[in-house]
Amino acid sequence: MNYSLWNQFENFVNEDYEKCFSPVSVLPYLALKHNFNHEKIIKDLDDDYCLKNISLMDISKLINDFYSFSGIKNENAFKFIMHEVIDNMYEHSHFTQAYALSKACANIIDYCFLDNGISIQKSFENNNFDFKDDCDAILKAINGKSTKQVSGYIERGYGLNNIISLLTLENNGSVLIASRKGAVYIDGNKIYLKELSKKSIEGTLICLRFEVNQDFDNFYSLIDGFHNFEV
Amino acid sequence: MIKINLYDEFGSDLGQRYLIKEIFENLDNNSQKVIFDFKDIDFVSRSFAQEYLNHKMMADYEIEEMNIPDVVKNMFNVILKNNNFDEMY
């Protein structure tokens, strides 16, 4: 697996489906089709594998299954990331179909979450949140803009920021988020934005790359607070 | 007094936000004192912890907790610190 998440995404945008994301899934119940296509995969994947058919009560079991195949050392950090991503999908996306896909090679494991929901930008628009363009909306979501800020004492909006901090700041991972015509890729201290000209992602695509041998000893320090991701 | 054993309700992992939200929604109108038992809990997500702490602070009835493991205390403390609360677990 020589491709970064960004390389694979560019291949996906250019419709070179043999070189994008994953020809093989490490999750036995989520076999990826060889020709990867966001819309096609949403349409073709077996209903049994669809998150809409998995009760929220069973999400913990699903994540435990993910962990058992991952080889990642720090179970707490892994579960933290997976629960936040899936919780966000259920809370914000209004999807009718969503899938988790994964592949592993050497000391890297990638997870890709696809949904056909309303997109980050539409969610912002529904709540009258301003954003310059589709990339800006994704960046704002990463930097804590939450449409679910409710009354109370405890602020929301840290989850996605924490996930990206955990993976990218000190643990050699990377994150790619694409929604509608925006794509944001974060790898180490580098942030890339791309407005897609040819393609629009229906819903949201979130790809997470873990380096398996990271022990995430810095788990609590990285989720303690907020990191501002700016280009 | 109502005692809620979280392991019996959800198993060892406290993951999705809506789970604890539902518990509090069912409690709101008919509770005077609630005890949450965290025995045998191995994991709590940020979403679950955030929702729990928020409901706890807004509850107009007494809430007690027992058997809180370090993994839960650590997550609660991160959230409380991020929201400028001095009180810690």
Image: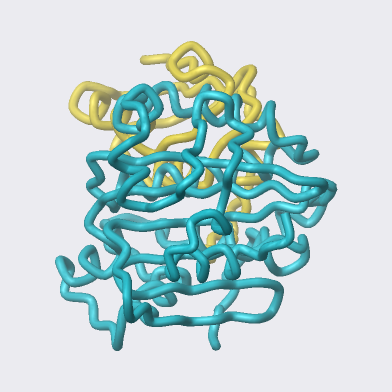
Chain colours: A cyan, B yellow
Residue at the spot 51% in from the left edge and 41% down from the top edge: A101
- Would you say residue B33 is visible in this rendering? no
In the foreground, A210 or A198: A198
Q: Position of residue A53 (x, y in %)?
A: 31, 25
Looking at the image, the residue that sits furthest to the top is B8
* Figure quadrant of residue B72: top right
A129 left or right of A38 in image: left
Q: Position of residue A110 (x, y in %)?
A: 63, 49
Question: What quarter of the picture does the C terminus of chain B occupy?
Answer: top right
A111 left or right of A74 in image: left
- Compared with A178, B3 (above or below) is above
Residue at the spot 37% in from the left edge and 75% down from the top edge: A182
In the foreground, A166 or B62: A166
- Compared with A9, A26 (above or below) is above
Q: Position of residue A207 (x, y in %)?
A: 53, 56
* Figure quadrant of residue A198: bottom left
* Figure quadrant of residue B39: top right
- Would you say residue A132 is visible in this rendering? yes
- Compared with B44, B75 (above or below) is below
Residue at the spot 34% in from the left edge and 64% down from the top edge: A146
Q: Position of residue A186 (x, y in %)?
A: 60, 72
Count every numbered label the image shows and give the total: 0
Residue at the spot 40% in from the left edge and 76% down from the top edge: A140
Question: What quarter of the picture does the N terminus of chain B occupy?
Answer: top left
